Image (cartoon, rainbow, N blue to C red):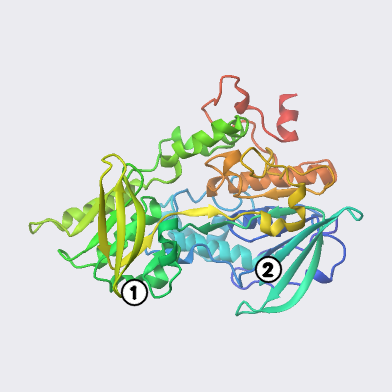
Amino acid sequence: MNASTAPEDPPAEEPEAAPQQDQQQEPFDLLGVGVGPFNLSLAALADAVPGLTTAFYDQRQDFHWHPGLLVDGATLQVPFLADLVTLADPASRWSFLNFLKARDRLFPFYFAERFHVHRAEYDAYCRWVADALPSTHFGRQVDTVRWDAGRGHFEVDHTQLDVHGEAEALGRTYARHLVLGIGTAPYVPEPLRPLAETPTVPVVHSADYLPQRERLLAAEHITVIGSGQSGAEVFLDLLRSRPAGREAITWLARTPAFAPMEYSRLGLEHFTPDYTRYFHGLPEPVRDRLVPQQWQLHKGIDTETITAIHDELYRRTLDGGWPDAVLTPGVAVRTAGRIGTTGIELHLEHADQGTRTRLVTSAVVLATGYRERPLDQLLGPLHPHVLRDAAGRPRIDARHRLELDRRVTGRVYVQNAERHTHGVGAPDLGLAAWRSAVILNDLTGLLTGAEHYPLPARTAFTTFGLDGAAACDVPTRTAALRRG
């Protein structure tokens, strides 16, 4: 491993210019593909590991976290302690509290007594880290990955992009190990896909809500589809922006209710490493059955937003009458199409009643969530080496490594592409730092024989499973040493 090039103190505002790492023929110890919150967490924690050489590439020009959903007043659904580093290294200089200190905002934050910070503030914090880390490189699109068995490292071909996203130059980087953090993509249900792909039709995913907000507000009638947090925030924002008595908004959802997110103390223990380990150890059919049943753990709405929606609706009844707003759960969109030049027709079916009807609307916001981006296209030549489960999905072990055949000795870690093996906590920001520490411990254990981040042997009061293994079976040498 080569010496780290990290600066002693991160600048508060301006990032350092990214070096042209392609010129370095010595392979990086770890190359990351994608710079979202999860790989950014890994980059921040890796920055403190002496001698570890890393680089992280992203095709975007800079870091942005769900810019289309930074609605005024919207907050994270996890506490500020679930930043990029704190739950693995509270003393890290890349913590949210250090971000506040660098911005002279510690005292205002202290007196605000906010446990859940604004989304826009989290986005600004992540950009502060991404701009300052020497290992993050934007405007680099990774095209394909190959394993060079003779040299024992990966070859990563990439394209340097200009500010307009056009190709400027081709490059090749070498790395002993990889981590894939390519994130998720907005999901558009099949019946609405043709309309959403037509630019002149006002059918937009909630990921693009803010850029399309004025266009949507000008519509005669708006329909929001999706009962999660994003759908609730979009519905509330539209409701507050429409005149009383002329709201003309319909909110539909497939779920049986506009339900609150499970936020009880013991319920939240489903987002602990203990539960992740328990889930990973279950048989594949059981895991596949559990994930859809746990929708309220990650697809519900926080009670503050539900309360705000009800308060706003109630306020509009004070002068008599009811707001022109329809909220209907348990409904699926069967088909959709255009009516004339301005209308959109949705054919609906109610799950419990079995009844069908049609709804004519002027605009649709799809708060229909995200799906993991497939890894196969990126991995390309590695595809034959990836071991798969009965459903054809990549097998991922307890340390977040793709299971590869023995011909590939380099390790490929994944972030937020393992819900089928690690459960509902895979996309949760609260587990970002822990997962990054597990990956780094596995890597440093391989390279130096020592783990950099001690991890707790137990993280939940709940013991998941009768064998009790989840309470102590931490996939690190640290835990093994603690158990003797």
> Which label was assigned to residue 141?
2
Q: Nearer the viewer, residue 234 or 78?
A: 234
**Location of residue 479 in the rendering, given as x and y in whole percent from the top left corner:** 70, 31
> Which label was assigned to residue 43?
none
Q: Residue at x 79, y 54 (%)?
A: 52
**SS for dot 2:** strand
Q: Is residue 55 above or below residue 328?
A: below
Q: Is residue 386 left or right of residue 85?
A: right
Q: Nearer the viewer, residue 350 or 27?
A: 350
Q: Local crowd at mark 1 within 10 Å, few (<14), some, or many (≥20)?
A: few
**Location of residue 62 in the rendering, given as x and y in whole percent from the top left corner:** 60, 70
Q: Is residue 74 left or right of residue 157?
A: left
**Location of residue 332 in the rendering, given as x and y in whole percent from the top left corner:** 35, 49
Q: Check the picture and name the quadrant holding the C terminus.
A: top right
**Residue type, numbered disc 2:** Gln
Residue closest to the far top: 466
Distance in Å between CA atoms under marks 1 and 2? 32 Å
Q: Check the picture and name the quadrant holding the N terminus.
A: bottom right
| Residue 205 appears in the rendering | yes
The image quadrant that residue 282 belongs to is top right
**Mark 1 — residue?**
215
Q: Residue at x 45, y 32 (%)?
A: 266
